[in-house]
Image (cartoon, rainbow, N blue to C red):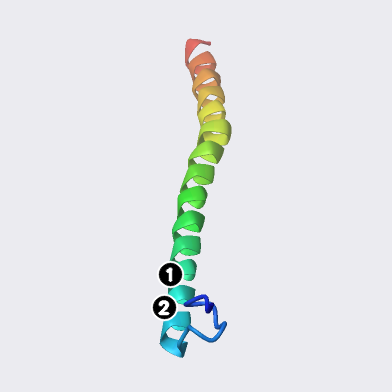
Amino acid sequence: MAVSGYGCGGGTREELQDEGDRITGMAENLTTYWTERLTTFMYMCTLMPLMTEVTAYCTERVIE
C-alpha cells in the first residue's frame, strides 16, 4: 500500500511539493503566532513596569 504524498510510490512530485508547501505554511503561521505572543509577553513584563517606574519617578520630581 502506497502512502500518498510521502514518496512511497504513490506520491507524485507535485503532491510532495504541495505537502511541503502546506507544512511550511503551517510552520510560518505558528512562528508568527508565537512571535506575536512572545512580543506581547515581553512588552507586558518589561515595558509596563518600566513605564510605571518612569511615571513614579516623574511624579516624585514634580511633587518636590
Q: Position of residue 22 (x, y in %)?
A: 43, 69
Q: Against 60, is 54 above or below?
A: below
**13 above or below 59?**
below
Residue at image coords 52%, 79%: 2
Q: Specify the label residue 18 is tagged with.
A: 2
Q: Nearer the viewer, residue 42 or 15?
A: 15
Secondary structure under the numbered disc 1 in the rendered image: helix
Identified by mark 1, the residue type is: Arg
Q: Residues within 10 Å of mark 2 (few under 14, many from 20)?
A: few
Q: Residue furthest front?
A: 1
Q: Secondary structure at mark 2?
A: helix
Where residue 54 appears, as percent x and y from the top left, is 53, 26
Residue 22 has which mark?
Answer: 1
The Cα atoms of the two marked residues, 2 and 1, are separated by 6 Å
Looking at the rendering, in which quadrant would you find the N terminus? bottom right
Q: Amino acid at mark 2?
A: Asp
Query: Given contact means CB atoms under 8 Å apart, are the residues at marks 2 and 1 in contact?
Result: yes
